[in-house]
């Protein structure tokens, strides 16, 4: 099938920043795109060929949308999987598959998948309701501290909480969840794996992630990770094992913990382009968004090595600021060497909302990290 300057139409469920950045690559290849999102102001609306507003958790909406395109992908996990399954039964190509997404969408199911496939992960307990947790603590079935995670609809630090005392259970939504052993880890790592329909598979280099302690969001992503090669190779081998177990087509971002004993445990995965791969737009031979397209269209995969060291800084809304956004001091960071801001196109800011990111590239990862710190301290995402 010809994808380039043809009648082929790629459908994308979700029109957020990941979709917007995927559209950089569809524009480059002249692939026709149709995007649906619940917000009429979604960042992807300007870069696609056709934009619809609609609820991607609604069965009929997703079914109708899927029937109007030749191949379907998504930039967010919170979509109606039953509709994707129905489309596949009609012969529609959906990548990553509904089977992969169904497993990943629910954190409890995802964790059970790792256990079943002998993939190392933190020990956990599954609860149908959060209200059952206190009983489990009382009868000795669960001990604090642990990490509470909502089974569904968690993202960007939402749906995750460290529980150290009984009072921390207050205000948790009473829904299906897991309680995960709190791992005393040294580093959080991520490896992005790309796999196409023919089974060609490649990994990007291991990246190191530094998190904001309160927002539970990634603040910095560093590539390459400042770790010994035997550890990065171990992480990449584990990511390949995870990808092989899912038999996925597309990108799979595998987030991991590096323990004090240098063991690598899978935390969770995302079946799509991912925050940990944003550095690749400036820093890699093939950026993650182009690679996702290559994978789902069964094209040869691009070279995944980095051309230069890269650090990514997330731009999130400042605390105590809600309203029309202002990127204060953006000109100052653009005067710094190797700095490229990416503004997602969200007109309204609120505390900790992801509004953009900045990539810093340099031959020296430590110099890039120092400039990244300067970027972080200089730019402010505030309201007018």
Image: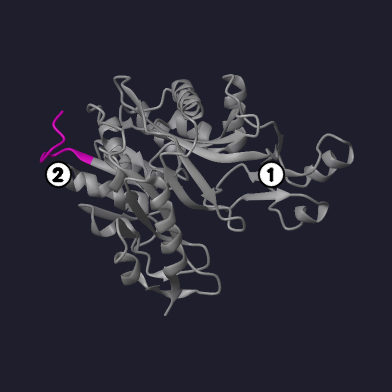
Residue 89 picture quarter: top left
Of the two numbered discs 2 and 1 in the rendering, the one whose residue sits closer to the viewer: 1
Residue at left offset 61%, top offset 40%: 186
Residue at left offset 56%, top offset 55%: 212
Q: Can residue 15 be seen in this view?
A: no
Residue at left offset 43%, top offset 36%: 271
Q: Is mark 1 on a helix, strand or loop?
A: strand
Does the magenta portion include 5? yes
| Region of the chain picked out in magenta, as a range | 1-9
Whichever of callouts 2 and 1 sits on the residue coming sooner in the sequence is 2
- The residue identified by callout 1 is 147
Residue 237: percent from the left, percent from the top?
A: 47, 23
Horizontally, is 58 left or right of 361 in the view? right
Does the magenta portion include 246? no
Question: On screen, 311 above or below 93?
Answer: below
Q: Can residue 127 be seen in this view?
A: yes
Horizontally, is 172 left or right of 218 in the view? right
Which disc, if any, is residue 30? 2
Residue 63: percent from the left, percent from the top?
A: 36, 41
Residue 198: percent from the left, percent from the top?
A: 29, 19
Q: Is mark 2 on a helix, strand or loop?
A: loop
Proximity of marks 2 and 1: CB atoms separated by less than 8 Å: no
Distance (Cα) linking label 2 and label 1: 45 Å
Furthest-right residue in this view: 139
Horizontally, is 232 left or right of 152 in the view? left
Say few, some or many: other residues with alpha carbon within 10 Å of mark 1 (under 14 / 14 to 19 / 20 or more). Answer: some
């Amino acid at each position: 099938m010809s994808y380039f300057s043809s009648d082929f139409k790629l459908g994308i469920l979700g029109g957020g920043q990941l979709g917007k950045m995927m559209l950089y690559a569809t524009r480059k290849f002249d692939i026709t795109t149709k995007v649906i999102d619940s917000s009429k102001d979604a960042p992807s609306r300007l870069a696609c060929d056709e934009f619809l507003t609609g609820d991607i958790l609604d069965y009929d909406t997703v079914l109708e949308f899927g029937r109007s395109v030749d191949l379907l992908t998504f930039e967010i996990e919170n979509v109606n999987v039953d509709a994707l399954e129905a489309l596949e039964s009609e012969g529609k190509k959906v990548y990553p598959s509904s089977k992969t997404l169904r497993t990943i969408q629910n954190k409890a199911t995802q964790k059970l998948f790792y256990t079943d496939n002998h993939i190392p992960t933190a020990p956990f307990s599954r609860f149908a309701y959060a209200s059952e947790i206190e009983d489990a603590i009382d009868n000795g079935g669960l001990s604090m501290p642990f990490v509470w995670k909502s089974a569904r609809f968690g993202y960007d630090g939402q749906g995750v909480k460290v529980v150290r005392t009984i009072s921390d259970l207050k205000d948790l939504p009473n829904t299906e969840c897991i309680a995960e052993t709190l791992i005393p880890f040294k580093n959080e790592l991520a490896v992005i794996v790309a796999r196409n329909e023919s089974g060609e598979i490649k990994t990007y280099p291991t990246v190191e992630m530094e998190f904001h302690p309160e927002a539970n969001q990634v603040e910095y992503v560093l590539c390459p990770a400042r770790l010994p090669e035997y550890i990065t190779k171990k992480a990449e081998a584990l990511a390949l094992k995870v990808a092989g177990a899912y038999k996925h087509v597309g990108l799979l971002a595998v987030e991991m913990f590096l323990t004090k004993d240098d063991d690598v445990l899978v935390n969770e995965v995302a079946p799509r382009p991912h925050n940990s791969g944003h550095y690749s737009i400036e820093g890699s031979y093939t950026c993650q968004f182009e690679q996702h397209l290559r994978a789902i269209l069964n094209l040869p995969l691009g070279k995944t090595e980095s051309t230069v060291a890269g650090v990514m800084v997330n731009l999130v809304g400042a605390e105590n600021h809600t309203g029309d956004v202002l990127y204060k001091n953006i000109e100052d960071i653009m005067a710094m060497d190797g700095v490229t801001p990416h503004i997602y196109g969200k007109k309204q800011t609120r505390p900790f909302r992801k509004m953009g990111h900045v990539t810093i590239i340099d031959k020296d990862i430590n110099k890039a990290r120092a400039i990244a710190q300067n970027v972080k301290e200089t730019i402010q995402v505030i309201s007018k």
